[in-house]
């Protein structure tokens, strides 16, 4: 049988036939009749979609009108109401309002500019008009979806609603000079959930009321109605490390006690009877206050700064969840929202102990700040430039403490004079520590000297030192105030910067060099050199005890190094204080040493004291008796 083969002519023929058929089909599809048919079909499709959309809107309006009718004055037909609930659910009416399309409503006074989103009814922008950040950008407490206020509730038809997802109807009115914004999430004209904002002139506190009307048959009272308040703190200062150290969640119990979450990492606490919650962002705060304490409050804080050497937008994320109590099945909660400076003078105007959200220090340290340093600096800065006010305040503090410094130096001078006699006693009783200590204590008692008297002044100055350490980071009056080369006394004063990120060094030291910490470190070095040298000369070496001289010599170099590294990212105002303070202290010590204390007179007084009969007090007698008994026991053991 002959085999059939496909020759080249057949292939060419098939290609030509295919091309002719494709051309005929293309010509047919682009004929005037075909084009007209396609346009007609497209037009019919558009009209059909419009008709369907209109029918959908008409259905919503109809259902809404029926919903309002069956629910009027509480005389609802339960069968119809149930059918409507199943069809659209609660708050169906709100979806037919113009506000359902979104948009924002603006409130403002002399100090605040606010935007409230019609979807969710909460603040989506808060700008402080009178302040700018380190980069001259206006201070925003809320912007770019960094905040949320939401109420979640359970309905009687087993739905879970979050107000942040639902549209509110805004109504802006006036109450005297106050602006009032009513945001209503409606079931009907007589049934709704309302957020009511009232803003007074020149005021950082926004009155905020949450209430419901006619929703007792909608809200499932057996389930918790929760209020969620969240915020991511925005960066405002030049040093993210320094700012983040003083950015913290603080809260007050109803009994006046103030507590806070952890400064670093993540913290989560559930507290009872909370009267206010403060989301502190260094020099600015967002605070929620309540007329009646929250029964419970679950509080969270999360540190968002993973690497302080990198540029970042946010410092910490805060969250609080509080249950709202129902009254007759309805919500009625009166709150306040403060957005403004973390300034004690401003916060005190609103009462409620809000100034306690500022970290003045605990116990006596906070008392010194609130009652001495804050009023003193406020008085000085009212007529002096802030930098000059710091210097004057430093001079006054050092002058007040100069008697303590005199006592310390006098004690060291006495110990220096007695050192040869103490060394002789130690040599005489080289193998008997107990006897050596007895005679040494007897010498101290006769001479009117004590090795502890040199340490006591340092302990007296410690509360002042720590109080000032806490004062400068909280002194709002220093913010963006310049002095000499420092542009901002509340931030570091860089004289040299670099962009390269150096591991470890950039994290702890930063990418800059500050001058005031260098000057303060130099002053501390010379101060330590003077005081440590005096102490080494005056303190006798005790047998079996560590060499204090070597330890003090190490401190001469360690303390300035600590100042140099640790304070490089701190407020330049704090470094300025330590620089001036150590200069003044050095000056006072030189005056005491050269013009006030005469070692020959001190020696003569010691000799006079030795000759006087010394009456021992009960404590000294008891100590002498104990040491004597211990010595007798030791001698008895040796004989055995």
Image (cartoon, helix red, strand yellow):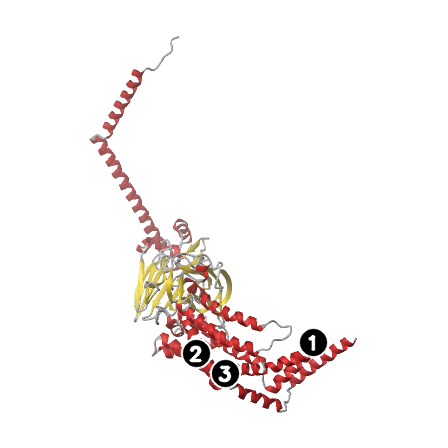
- Check residue 392 in the rendering and tell me which mark sits there, or answer none: none
| 512 relative position to 598: left or right | left
Element assignment for label 1: loop
Residue ranking furthest to the right: 640
- Check residue 431 in the rendering and tell me which mark sits there, or answer none: 1
Q: At which x and y percent is residue 447?
A: 60, 86
| 274 relative position to 106: left or right | right
Please rate how many residues cluster around mark 3, counting C-alpha atoms within 10 Å: few if below 14, some from 14 to 19, many from 20: some
Q: Which residue is mark 2?
A: 584
Q: Classify residue 609 by image quadrant.
A: bottom right
Image point (73%, 77%), residue name: 634
**Is 372 or 63 nearer to us in this picture?**
372
**Is 527 or 508 nearer to us in this picture?**
527
| 135 relative position to 635: left or right | left
Residue ranking furthest to the left: 32
Q: CA distance from mark 2 to mark 3?
A: 14 Å
Q: At which x and y percent is residue 13?
A: 28, 18
| 518 relative position to 636: left or right | left
595 over 35 or under it: above or below: below
User: Which quadrant of the figure contains the C terminus?
Assistant: bottom right
- Sequence order check, earlier mark of 2 and 3: 3
1 or 2: mark nearer the eye? 1
Element assignment for label 3: helix
Q: Which residue is mark 3?
A: 406
Element assignment for label 2: helix
Check if mark 1's residue and mark 2's residue have beta carbons within 8 Å: no
Q: At which x and y percent is residue 610?
A: 61, 89
């Amino acid at each position: 049988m002959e085999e059939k083969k496909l020759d080249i002519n057949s292939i060419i023929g098939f290609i030509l036939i295919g091309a002719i058929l494709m051309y005929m089909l293309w010509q047919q599809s682009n004929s005037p009749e075909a084009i007209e048919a396609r346009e007609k079909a497209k037009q019919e499709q558009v009209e059909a979609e419009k008709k369907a959309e209109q029918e959908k809107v008409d259905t919503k309006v109809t259902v809404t009108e029926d919903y309002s009718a069956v629910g009027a004055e509480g005389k609802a037909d339960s069968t119809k109401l149930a059918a409507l609930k199943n069809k659209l659910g609660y708050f169906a009416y709100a979806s037919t309002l113009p506000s359902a399309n979104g948009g924002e409503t603006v409130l403002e006074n002399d100090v605040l500019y606010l935007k409230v989103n019609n979807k969710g009814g909460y603040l989506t922008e808060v700008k402080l008009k009178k302040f700018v950040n380190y980069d001259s950008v206006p201070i925003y407490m809320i912007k770019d979806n960094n905040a949320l206020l939401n109420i979640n509730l359970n309905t009687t038809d087993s739905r879970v609603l979050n107000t942040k997802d639902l549209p509110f109807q805004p109504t802006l009115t006036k109450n005297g000079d106050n602006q009032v914004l009513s945001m209503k999430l409606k079931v009907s004209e007589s049934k709704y959930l309302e957020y009511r904002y009232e803003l007074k002139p020149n005021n950082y506190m926004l009155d905020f009321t949450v209430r419901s009307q006619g929703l007792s048959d909608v809200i499932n009272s057996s389930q918790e109605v929760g209020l969620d308040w969240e915020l991511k703190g925005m960066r405002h200062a030049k040093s993210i490390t320094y700012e983040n150290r003083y950015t913290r969640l603080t809260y007050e119990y109803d009994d006046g006690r103030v507590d806070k979450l952890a400064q670093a990492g993540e913290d989560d606490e559930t507290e009872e009877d909370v009267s206010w919650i403060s989301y502190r962002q260094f020099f600015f705060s967002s605070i929620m206050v309540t007329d009646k304490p929250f029964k419970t409050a679950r509080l969270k804080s999360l540190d968002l700064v993973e690497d302080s050497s990198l540029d970042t937008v946010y410092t910490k994320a805060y969250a609080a969840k509080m249950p709202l109590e129902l009254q007759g099945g309805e919500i009625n909660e009166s709150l306040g929202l403060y957005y403004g400076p973390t300034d004690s003078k401003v916060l005190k105007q609103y009462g409620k102990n809000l100034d306690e959200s500022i970290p003045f220090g605990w116990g006596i340290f906070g008392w010194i700040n609130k009652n001495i340093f804050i009023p003193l600096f406020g008085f000085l800065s009212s007529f002096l430039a802030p930098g000059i006010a710091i210097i004057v305040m430093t001079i006054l503090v050092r002058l007040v403490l100069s008697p303590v410094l005199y006592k310390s130096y006098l004690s060291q001078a006495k110990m220096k004079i007695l050192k040869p006699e103490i060394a002789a006693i130690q040599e005489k009783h080289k193998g008997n520590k107990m006897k050596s200590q007895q005679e040494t204590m007897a010498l101290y008692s006769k001479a009117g000297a004590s090795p502890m008297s040199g340490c006591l002044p340092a302990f007296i100055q410690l509360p002042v030192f720590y109080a000032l350490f806490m004062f400068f980071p909280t002194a709002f009056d220093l913010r963006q105030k310049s002095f000499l080369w420092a542009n901002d006394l509340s931030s570091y004063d860089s004289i040299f910067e670099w962009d390269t990120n150096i591991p470890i060094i950039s994290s702890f030291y930063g990418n800059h060099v500050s001058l005031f910490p260098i000057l303060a470190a130099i002053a501390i070095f010379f101060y330590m050199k003077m005081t440590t040298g005096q102490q080494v000369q005056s303190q006798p070496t005790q047998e079996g005890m560590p060499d204090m001289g070597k330890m003090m010599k190490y401190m001469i170099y360690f303390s300035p190094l600590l100042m140099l590294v640790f304070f490089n990212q701190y407020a330049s105002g704090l470094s300025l204080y330590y620089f001036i303070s150590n200069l003044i202290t050095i000056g006072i010590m030189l005056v005491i040493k050269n013009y006030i204390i005469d070692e020959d007179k001190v020696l003569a007084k010691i000799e006079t004291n030795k000759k006087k009969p010394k009456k021992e007090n009960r404590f000294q007698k008891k100590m002498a008796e104990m040491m004597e008994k211990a010595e007798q026991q030791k001698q008895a053991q040796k004989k055995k």
